[in-house]
Image: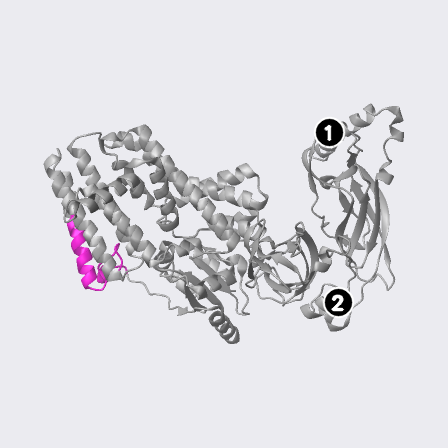
């Protein structure tokens, strides 16, 4: 293996050596020596080493060819922290990140105990490789240097040093003394003066960031992001207060912050020992006078004190949505697209998406004798693209604005109106538009129905767009991951591509339906009438399923009973045209029995169409939740649980969320899950109404909708990396809950 590594290094250096060989003999007069082209100085404050680079104009350094090491046994270097460079298309290495001009590279350093009181000499090896724009590339080289590192002694209060635990007010007060001139003469402030940033720990598992924003300047909410380059800890969601709405010339309506901004970040880490955590903070702001600064990234060192109650292995756990978000940010783009297409394909077979199948099938069946394989496929493609584009654009808008778009489309009147549309479509399938309807209304309804189900491809695409917003009503880890990437980092391109790929995956089975419909559906004759009536039953089924979110359980069973008896009528009409009369008779008898069971269940107080008779349903004990409505309610409950030394679970629920009801029935009802939650305080945030309090609670957690479950330890701190998004089976949920609340 060492031989292979040396061979790889030699192969990488050959182009550079070849270039040096072809440089004319008078090149020494044209190009600078490496020591003159890449000048540097090194200093240290005892906590980190800073290499100050000064690259001459017309020269640059490769980011991937740089490195800093030491041979000193009494010093340990951390991971170098590099600034963001510029992208450069290189003839030999492809697209590379490079540095020009002045920039700093910081390296955390830890000295072994017993080094005395004076500064310690630490030898350093600086690895680098660079080129000149004029065509010369220098070979990789390593320069030897030394740096004096002060020995930091203990300070009062448990070793408080720069960046350690101290109040934000104190840090801001000290930062005001930092000198800074205008970045553009006397007109505009230097960005470090316009936006003074400090960081401090707010307990063992939380970091607090604070910006002091100069008058006449502001920061964009959706340009804020944090990450850590350290090991042993993961950052949670950046918790931000509500800003003010600002109409921006370039970005449109934006949420911004003025004067001062304080944000908090939960930290999940293994063990309870003290930890120095590097945090890279990205932000962007503007001046009212017209200047907008480029995005700024600063890396701050924050000392977290000993403490925390996470188990040694809990810091290693990463939730599905967080893993997927990291994969979107850093993974190979083709792999990201393929992975999220597969994730969408799996989502297509969940109860949140399956209702799209009868919708599209009914649209194709509505073609009547005109249906062909080609036309059915392109109708399906129109439907899927309408769904995918709407899902992607709505997701990008929702993530950028922090809004709950899908929740807004679950208002009772919207759901009811959409269900009524399906009832109209079902009646048209049954051929009943002429019953008790004036001719003018009948004509308009028939025309509108035909345009939606069989007329133009644009109408079918519109139905796909509406289905994406109203029918698919659940969040899932893949969806949350894409929205988090867009909302937190502003990476619209990668997040949007992942969201579009997931939408196409969700629509892939629908394309299969379209491709096969022309072969499976009869082309003409009495059978086509039976098929159309059968799809009318499916439309009524979708309408009953949708109205079940907004009406009482007993009424929902009656709606399902109407659907069942309409199926009986279709089967009775089909007997006369069927060769095998026993098939429609058996299907009709089964539908009649199911309809009678639904009527009996409604009379007995049932609410579950899959188990309409309450006494015959599988008994299971229900978890008893206490409801919280506002952030203040939640904080009160957390404080009470912490005082009692009990962990806590918060469940985000909505009546229109299918996966929420799956969790209620199939996960929370299992004995293993109830045993895992026996000691926990159980809270539920019902966000069905999606009112101001609901939206504030969702924004407080930075989540996009139910089902989402958050766990808190007995110390009152959320175990952010254990969040559950989407439906999870009991066998997986029970051990996760046990670990999360240790």
Q: Is residue 477 left or right of residue 18?
A: left
Q: Is residue 255 left or right of residue 430?
A: right
In the rendered image, the quadrant that contains the N terminus is top right
How are the colours assigned in the image?
Answer: one colour
* First reached walking from the N terminus: tag 1 or tag 2: 1
Where does the image place residue 51, in percent across and percent down from the top left? Answer: 80, 49
Let me know if residue 695 is in the magenta part: no
The span from disc 1 to disc 2 (Cα, nearest Å) is: 51 Å
Let me know if residue 606 is in the magenta part: yes
Where does label 2 land, which residue? 174
Q: For the residue labelled by badge 1, is the local secondary structure a helix, a strand or a loop?
A: helix
Can you say whether 377 is above or below 635 in the image? above
Q: Which mark identifies residue 11?
A: 1
Which stretch appears magenta?
590-618
Q: For the residue labelled by badge 2, is the local secondary structure a helix, a strand or a loop?
A: helix
Where does the image place residue 586, in percent across and percent down from the top left? Answer: 15, 43
Q: Is residue 362 left or right of residue 644?
A: left
Q: Is residue 584 visible?
A: yes
Can you say whether 228 is above or below 377 in the image? below
Q: Residues within 10 Å of mark 1 (few under 14, many from 20)?
A: few
């Amino acid at each position: 293996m060492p031989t292979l590594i040396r061979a790889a290094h030699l192969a990488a250096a050959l182009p550079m050596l070849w270039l040096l060989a072809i440089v004319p003999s008078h090149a020494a007069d044209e190009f600078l020596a490496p020591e003159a082209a890449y000048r540097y100085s090194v200093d240290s404050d005892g906590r980190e080493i800073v290499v100050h680079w000064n690259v001459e104009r017309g020269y640059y350094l490769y980011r991937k060819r740089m490195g800093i090491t030491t041979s000193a046994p009494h010093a340990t270097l951390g991971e170098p922290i590099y600034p963001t460079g510029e992208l450069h298309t290189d003839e030999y290495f492809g697209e590379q990140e490079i540095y020009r001009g002045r920039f700093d590279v910081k390296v955390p350093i830890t000295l072994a105990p017993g080094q005395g009181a004076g500064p310690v000499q630490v030898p350093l090896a600086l690895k680098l490789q660079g080129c000149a724009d004029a065509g010369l590339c220098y070979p990789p080289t390593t320069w030897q240097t030394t740096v004096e590192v002060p020995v930091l002694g203990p300070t009062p209060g448990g070793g408080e040093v720069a960046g350690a635990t101290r109040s934000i007010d104190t840090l801001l007060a000290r930062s005001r003394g930092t000198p800074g001139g205008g970045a553009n003469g006397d007109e505009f402030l230097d960005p470090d003066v316009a936006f003074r940033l400090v960081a401090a720990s707010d307990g063992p598992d939380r970091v607090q960031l604070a910006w002091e924003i100069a008058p006449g300047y502001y920061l964009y909410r959706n340009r804020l992001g944090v990450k850590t380059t350290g090991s042993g800890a993961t950052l949670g969601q950046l918790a931000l207060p509500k800003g003010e709405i600002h109409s921006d010339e370039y970005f449109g309506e934006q949420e911004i912050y003025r004067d001062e901004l304080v944000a908090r970040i939960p930290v999940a880490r293994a063990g309870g020992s003290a930890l120095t955590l590097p945090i890279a903070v990205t932000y962007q702001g503007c001046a009212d006078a017209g200047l907008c600064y480029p995005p700024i990234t600063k890396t701050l060192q924050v000392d977290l004190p000993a403490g925390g109650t996470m188990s040694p292995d809990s810091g290693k756990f990463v939730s599905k949505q967080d893993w997927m978000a990291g994969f979107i940010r850093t993974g190979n783009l083709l792999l990201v697209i393929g992975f999220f297409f597969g994730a969408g394909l799996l989502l297509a077979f969940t109860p949140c998406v399956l209702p799209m199948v009868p919708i599209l099938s009914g649209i194709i069946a509505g073609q009547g004798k005109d249906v062909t394989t080609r036309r059915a496929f392109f109708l399906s493609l129109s439907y899927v693209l309408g769904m995918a584009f709407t899902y992607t654009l709505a997701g990008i808008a929702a993530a950028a604005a922090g809004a709950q778009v899908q929740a807004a489309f679950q208002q009772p009147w919207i759901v009811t109106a959409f269900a009524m549309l399906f009832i109209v479509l079902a009646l048209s399938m049954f051929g009943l538009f002429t019953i008790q309807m004036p001719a003018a209304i009948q004509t308009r309804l028939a025309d509108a129905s035909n345009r939606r189900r069989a007329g133009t491809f644009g109408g079918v695409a519109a139905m796909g767009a509406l289905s994406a917003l109203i029918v698919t009503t659940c969040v899932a880890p893949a969806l949350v991951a894409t929205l988090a990437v867009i909302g937190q980092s502003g990476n619209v391109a990668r997040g949007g591509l992942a969201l579009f790929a997931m939408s196409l995956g969700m629509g892939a089975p629908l394309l299969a339906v379209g491709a096969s419909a022309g072969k499976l559906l009869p082309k003409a004759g009495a059978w086509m009438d039976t098929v159309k009536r059968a799809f009318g039953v499916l439309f009524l089924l979708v309408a009953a399923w949708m109205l079940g979110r907004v009406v009482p359980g007993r009424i929902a069973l009656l709606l399902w009973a109407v659907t069942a008896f309409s199926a009986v009528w279709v089967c009775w009409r089909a007997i006369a045209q069927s060769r095998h009369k026993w098939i429609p008779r058996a299907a009709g008898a089964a539908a009649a029995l199911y309809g009678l069971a639904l009527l009996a269940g409604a009379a007995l107080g049932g609410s579950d169409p899959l188990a309409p008779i309450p006494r015959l349903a599988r008994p299971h004990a229900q978890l008893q939740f206490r409801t919280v409505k506002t952030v203040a309610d939640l904080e009160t409950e957390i404080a009470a649980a912490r005082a009692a030394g009990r962990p806590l679970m918060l469940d985000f629920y909505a009546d229109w969320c299918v996966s929420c009801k799956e969790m209620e029935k199939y996960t929370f009802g299992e004995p293993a899950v109830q045993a895992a939650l026996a000691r926990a305080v159980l809270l539920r945030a019902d966000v069905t109404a999606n009112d101001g309090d609901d939206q504030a609670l969702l924004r407080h957690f930075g989540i996009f909708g139910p089902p989402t479950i958050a766990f808190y330890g007995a110390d009152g701190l959320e175990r952010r990396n254990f969040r559950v998004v989407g439906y999870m089976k009991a066998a997986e949920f029970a051990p996760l809950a046990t670990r999360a609340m240790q």
